[in-house]
Amino acid sequence: MDFRSQFLITNSSDKLNLSTTSTAMDLGMEEKEILKVLKKNRKELAELQEKIYAERRRGVLIVFQAMDAAGKDSTIREVFTGLNPQGTGFYSFKSPSKEELSHDFLWRCNKCLPPKGNINVFNRSHYEETLVVRVHPEYLMGQSLPDISAPTDATQSFWDGRFEMINDWEERMAKNGITVIKFFLNVGLDEQKNRFLRRLNKPDKNWKFNFGDLKERALWGDYMSAYADMIPKTSTSKAPWYVIPADDKPTMRMVISEIVKDTLKDMNPEYPKASADFELEKIEALRILG
Ligand code: ATP
Ligand code: MG
């Protein structure tokens, strides 16, 4: 199943229109079969991770962006549950702290990049700086930026400048051996409503409900415009964006696990070869151990 070409948004894509991009997909597979593939992929991912960790030459960064209740948390849990915590890093990015605001917008994310041998996952990311901040340009006032003294100063060229900075930064990652994969979980407006209602109506889901999410839901169109501008402009061959229909969680998770698995396979990780010294050490060690 080649899901990469199916869900990839390329840099040269015509303008992305999220209002006509499907949030549901029917692969014609039964749920039992979908779960079986996911389970198999978890095992494969664990094996690939072990090799990447043993090599200690390269890293992997996997970015998740989505509207509220699209299923980021549970997808991360279900796809990466088989990975060894040693060699994996999970980071979520919320409203920046005072200290974070006193640095440039990539600073806090830069600190969370994978060291060689690691797979790191971002639950929200530096892209929030072109999404929530674009929808609420007043947030820029807290960033003390040279050419911004009012929210209206943030014109298209300001956001294009941010895309360029992000592209440069991700290119630097690629040159340093970090493979980057980015997912936008594309949930529908109706499905988000269903999920909010479930959070309100099911006692064991109440804790997930955040009244503030309704404020962002009311700005849905603004968010979709921000995503639609950002995704094609920051999708590069070394750091591609995949837009995954998110209304059906099991299918979405399986598709993501396939894309991650295929990308890691292409890295062709291998266990390091034993050194010449090892053979001598082995003879000596076997002698000592009797
Ligand atoms: P959940 O699905 O559990 O609600 P979440 O990722 O929405 O998870 P929250 O704590 O609800 O987590 O929200 C984090 C909030 O922080 C989001 O609304 C997000 O837009 C906001 N945020 C993240 N990065 C920035 C940023 N750079 N500037 C301003 N707000 C940000
Ligand atoms: Mg939230």
Image (cartoon, rainbow, N blue to C red):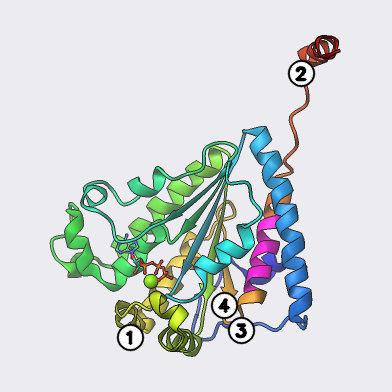
Mark 2 vs mark 3, foreground winner is 2
- Which quadrant is home to the C terminus? top right
- Residue 179 on the magenta span: no
- Residue 253 on the magenta span: yes
Q: Which secondary structure lies at badge 4?
A: loop
Residue 275 numbered mark, or none: 2
Q: How far apart are marks 2 and 3 (CA)?
A: 51 Å
Horizontal and vertical percent position of residue 34: 74, 74
The residue labelled by disc 1 is 218
Q: Which secondary structure lies at badge 3?
A: loop
Disc 1 under 8 Å from ligand 1? The reply is no
- Which quadrant is home to the N terminus? bottom right
Amino acid beneath label 1: Ala
Q: How far apart are marks 1 and 4 (CA)?
A: 19 Å
Ranked by sequence position, the earlier of labels 2 and 1 is 1
Q: Residues within 10 Å of mark 2 (few under 14, many from 20)?
A: few
Ligand 1 shown in quarter = bottom left
Out of 56 and 195, give the one closest to the viewer: 195
Asked whether residue 266 is in view, the answer is no
Residue 246 numbered mark, or none: 4
Residue lying at 22% horizontally and 65% vertically, measured from the top left: 139
| Disc 2 and disc 4 in contact, CB within 8 angstroms | no
The residue labelled by disc 3 is 24
> Looking at the image, is 18 positioned above or below residue 283?
below
* Image quadrant assignment for residue 137: bottom left
Looking at the rendering, the stretch of residues picked out in magenta corresponds to 252-262
Amino acid beneath label 3: Ala
Q: Distance between the residues labelled 2 and 1?
A: 61 Å
Q: How crowded is mark 4: few (under 14 residues within 10 Å), some or many (20 or more)?
A: many
